[in-house]
Image (spheres, rainbow, N blue to C red):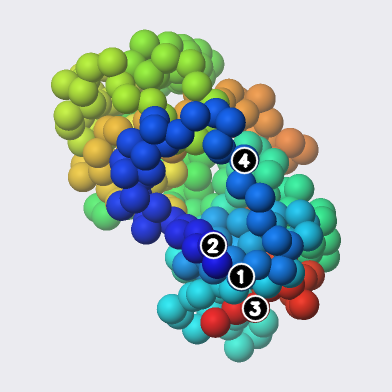
Amino acid sequence: MVVILSQCMRLFICLATLAFAQTISPTDRNITMDRNAAIVIVGGGPAGIHYATLLAKKGFTNIQLVEASASLGGKSDTIQDPLGFPHELGTCYAHGLYEPIFNLLREYDPTNIKVPFIPNVKGHTWVRQEGTSTVDYNAFVLRVAMKNSGITSLPELALAMQAAFGAYIKLHKSIFGTFAYGLPPQPKEWTLLSMPALAFLKVNNLMVLEGFFRYVFEQQGYGSVQDTPAFWMLWWMHPDVIMKRIQMAGPDKPWVFMLSKGFTSLWRAMIASYPTQITVH
């Protein structure tokens, strides 16, 4: 029997696994398994579900997925309101770099369509900040940018924000180097990040972008930019995300999406595709 630990549990065995791997010669790393051997995956979140379906695709027939909660998907959970509309409790959106998820949707849940989320279309998304009036997303971002920069001309403000996005990308690469979207490598100097996100923007003269970053984090429930660690902000706001936002944001080029049936629909569809090979406990 093989046991696969998904999500957080893998962190506890990561160092031990790496240390053990150093003692194994390259010729010993190919594991031969019977296709009917029992494989136990602990954790029915997105990672555990994906592991299970990948093993099923390879022909394994006795995959046991163990999940403590009553639903699949872990923190990526969707509930339906009385009118049948989905509400996400974990994963809220999929942006332009979620191509692996889009591939899974096409393969397993094709009727769960991408619904464009376009906050920069006037009247689409409203923001209310304490002590200020309710405005749409564009007005909020511009209001904060004007306040922080002192620039009142819209063309000049647009140029200042464009320059700030470029400066952010350059700074990001100077700290982490160039890497694919995902878990970042160790920063070159931790002291550059040992502060909240808002302080990082201030120190690096990027406050013209405060409205953009504040909306992204607070609207998705990541926390406030006053309290969110700068490392967390730079992790999620990868240069490729910024570039995708610049290239595609617009009514005809949406870059952020919600799912018509929610993410839970995808996780369930993936498991349901292998009824004789994957058993959920």
Alpha carbons under labels 2 and 3: distance apart? 15 Å
N-terminal of the pair, mark 2 or mark 3, is 2
Provide residue 125's location: percent of width, then percent of height.
54, 53
N-terminal of the pair, mark 4 or mark 1, is 4
- The number of numbered discs placed on residues in the rendered structure image is 4
N-terminal of the pair, mark 3 or mark 1, is 1
Mark 1 and mark 2 in contact? Answer it, CB < 8 Å.
yes
Q: Which quarter of the image is occupied by the N terminus?
A: bottom right
Check the image and report above or below for 215 versus 8.
above
The reply, left or right, for residue 36 in relation to residue 50 is right
**Residue 279 tag number:** 3
Q: Secondary structure at mark 2?
A: strand
N-terminal of the pair, mark 3 or mark 4, is 4
Report the amino acid beneath label 3: Thr
Report the amino acid beneath label 1: Ala
What residue sits right under mark 4 in the picture?
A: 30
Mark 3 and mark 1 in contact? Answer it, CB < 8 Å.
no
What residue sits right under mark 2 in the picture?
A: 2
Label 4 neighbour load within 10 Å: few <14, some 14-19, many 20+: few
**Residue at the spot 76% in from the left edge and 48% down from the top edge:** 103
The reply, left or right, for residue 27 in relation to residue 34 is left
The reply, left or right, for residue 161 in relation to residue 34 is left
**Residue 129 tag number:** none
Alpha carbons under labels 3 and 4: distance apart? 26 Å
Alpha carbons under labels 4 and 1: distance apart? 18 Å
Provide residue 43's location: percent of width, then percent of height.
48, 67
Q: Secondary structure at mark 1?
A: loop
Q: Secondary structure at mark 3?
A: strand
Alpha carbons under labels 1 and 2: distance apart? 6 Å
